[in-house]
Image (cartoon, coloured by chain):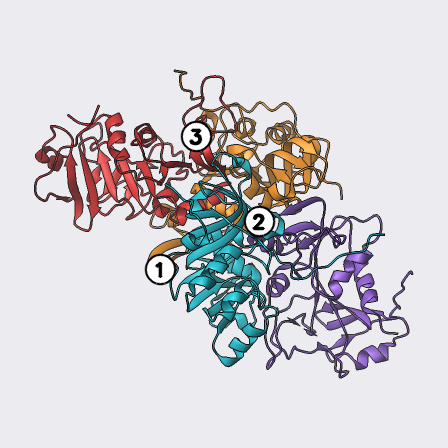
Chain colours: A orange, B cyan, C red, D purple
Amino acid sequence: MNKVVAGADEAIRDINDGAVLMLGGFGLCGIPENCIASLVKKGVKNLTCISNNAGVDDFGIGLMLQNKQVKKMISSYVGENAEFERQLLSGELEVELIPQGTLATRCMAAGYGMPAIYTPAGAGTEVAIGKETRNFNGKDYLLEYAFDADFAIVKAWKGDTDGNLVFKETARNFNPLMAMAGKITIAEVEELVPAGELDPNLIHTPGIYVHRIFQGVNYEKRIEQRTIRKKL
Amino acid sequence: MNKVVAGADEAIRDINDGAVLMLGGFGLCGIPENCIASLVKKGVKNLTCISNNAGVDDFGIGLMLQNKQVKKMISSYVGENAEFERQLLSGELEVELIPQGTLATRCMAAGYGMPAIYTPAGAGTEVAIGKETRNFNGKDYLLEYAFDADFAIVKAWKGDTDGNLVFKETARNFNPLMAMAGKITIAEVEELVPAGELDPNLIHTPGIYVHRIFQGVNYEKRIEQRTIRKKL
Amino acid sequence: MALTKEQIAQRIAKELKDGFYVNLGIGIPTLVANYIPKGINVVLQSENGLLGMGPFPFEGEEDPDLINAGKQTITTVPGSAFFDSAMSFGMIRAGKVDLTVLGAMEVSEQGDIANWKIPGKMVKGMGGAMDLVASAKNIIVAMMHTNPKGESKLLPGCMLPLTGVNCVKKVVSDLAVLDITPQGFKLLERAPGISVEEIRSKTAGRLLVEGEIPEMKFEV
Amino acid sequence: MALTKEQIAQRIAKELKDGFYVNLGIGIPTLVANYIPKGINVVLQSENGLLGMGPFPFEGEEDPDLINAGKQTITTVPGSAFFDSAMSFGMIRAGKVDLTVLGAMEVSEQGDIANWKIPGKMVKGMGGAMDLVASAKNIIVAMMHTNPKGESKLLPGCMLPLTGVNCVKKVVSDLAVLDITPQGFKLLERAPGISVEEIRSKTAGRLLVEGEIPEMKFEV
């Protein structure tokens, strides 16, 4: 059992045209920068990407959009991205927008072996069209299905050689949920340590969910909205 | 906002006859010893207890059974407990046995605001009688409802004054799930620290789920099956 | 005088109670954090996975791994906790968040809300808004009473695609504070110098006015 | 000679592959951990919330907070992780556990299993058994071929209340190794010195015998 790979190129070696990918991150926070770079380099096409956002024009999934590698985005909010908008309006890109909590819970459902879950998000709106609505205790819920993704690509803070992961601050977001949900889960980490170095009480994603792991390099960690306050 | 109470007596002050309680722990591991002692002392009766096990004759929930305080147990395995058996056979005690994963997931569903979940556990068996069976992708699942408990009583390793909790080893078990699921959640902890001392990255139960917290005393932590190996 | 955005936030802050867990949406709702009454302890939730959000960082102390749901760099306060997005929306769905404050394009007299999509315009997505409105037990909408053309945004029924149905409990606009009741918008307070007649003329949905309607007061 | 319980465990251990995540039930299955082939790395899951279970502790090193699903004091190995019971059964349901080994009172030729309840006797509960059998992608049953009265426990259909339907993939008994196939129990191996005829006479369910059936071999 060796889960450690040399780097992103090896980790994504069998991601081919038409694959369904989950990509962790919220905005540009906690995104798998190394794997995205390798996917862009590899030029694999017709991808379906499940990710809360679509990056910005020149960073994150935006790089894959620029390179015309994405056939379909499944997201909750696609943000400010001119190329995304152009492709969407021209019909080159298919987009499915779903509520953020539904997106998160459909990942969790896959990782927990639950075929579907009930959520009130979207009940009574156009999101409910074509979906089963069911009333529990006087409130309407939609039946939403677990995602079925070929690969989940996540970014963690620390990881060990057995695939155990720990995330940092709000860079956690969708990463542990997607890590549970991929048929094959690839984790890039800022710091890779030998098995046994992480406190087993404090692991966010147990290694059973992770198939490949590597220590990433050159993280840019771009900030999307730099907001500050003045020192008094 | 003050969640800290002096001790177990104050924490359980408004648990009255007929209440539905969740009690954390697996076997005797990670059980809320202090709150159980206070419930026994208070003598509150006709309780419905949702807990994976029922303790042993002279420890854990077994103490409440000895004291004839429990009307109904909802558990996955009731273990070796002579008084439990006597009450069950005499008809004094009602018992609902449900699969362990179903028990865990029905707690989680309550904490996650999901009215019901689908699980394959028990499909095609007598557990399925009276329940909705639904096929997803060729496999049968049962619809199981979220628990609705008045109080959840859990035991954590460390906690802070804002109610954030950290659990130790396999004493985690059902505790974080039940902590999310109570209308009122009471946490007893081995070590209570000021808010800000726990690493916010490494909290198992965020304080929003916890209404009362106190530092417990005199933990016995009885071992149910002491198994050892010989030194070579 | 119609309220400024700051005053809308200031008025909403009066709804806060000690110990509240609160989710503040983007825009005016975010400003509410600046007016939390003294002596009251409120914990801010950010739905990307944080309880205990603090103010923006000082320059040079920005942490790219620490952002809010608006993708802004933030800080934490003591007692904060991070968690994944499923737990985040889980605690919202389970009613653990005491108050949610959101912006809206339209609100109906039944408490329906539209705030995510304008037909014919580029749709960026609902983000967490649909989860929040469908799940939160107490929703206050912060909004302008009318659109730039002067048309009411408080309607008998929403015309834009809905974000959620029958979920808004209270509206604080630049002109008034209103509860959503089975009888429609119930006027509770007026902005200083704004008449009941003006509010009536700018409220397309049913407006319920009972007795004397007090003016809002703002301490400076 | 029929296999001992240790030999049943030893035979099951040959099914392990490097990198497997394995859940071992109480009784004979627990013994499998003693026979993990050299050079193979297997991670043991305990459904109360642990991956990376190690051997029993040395005397004096027992930790009451560290037990397995049989409530026995245990240890952990490097790379272990603790989690709550919902995640534990979640990873089982999601098929992340490669192999589950369980005991049984009865197994049917369709792969049904009964191992939790005997009518008329005190029922202690199914614990995690129903979740495991309904969820695991690969289940091997470790059992005696017959009950103490000599009656077959490999049946056309279970007579005891079921734990799960159509889920067992393989049976290793004291007499034989058998796969569950659409044609019933397919005999793969015999215990040393046990004839096909004896196995046939002690198997009430359909028994499929194709060609020569090899004897199991045990290195000492």
Q: Is residue A140 above or below residue A194?
A: below
Helix, strand or loop at disc 2? helix
Find disc 1 in the rendering and name its residue.
A137
Protein chain holding label 1: A
Disc assigned to residue A195: none
Toward the viewer: A197 or A216? Answer: A197
Mark nearer the viewer, 3 or 2: 2
Q: Is residue A143 visible?
A: no
Q: Position of residue C76 (x, y in %)?
A: 46, 30
| Residue type, numbered disc 3 | Gly
Q: Position of residue A39 (x, y in %)?
A: 62, 31
Disc assigned to residue A79: 3
Same-chain status of marks 3 and 2:
yes
Q: Is residue A117 above or below residue C4?
A: below
Toward the viewer: D132 or A143? Answer: D132
Point out the tag, 3 or 2, that comes first from the N-terminus.
3
| Residue type, numbered disc 1 | Asn
Protein chain holding label 2: A
- Residue at figure coordinates x 80%, y 82% from the top left: D201
Quarter of the picture holding the N terminus of chain C: top left
Q: Position of residue A89 (x, y in %)?
A: 42, 31
- Residue at figure coordinates x 56%, y 27% from the top left: A67
Point out the tag, 2 or 1, that comes first from the N-terminus.
2
Separation of marks 2 and 1 at Cα, in angstroms: 27 Å
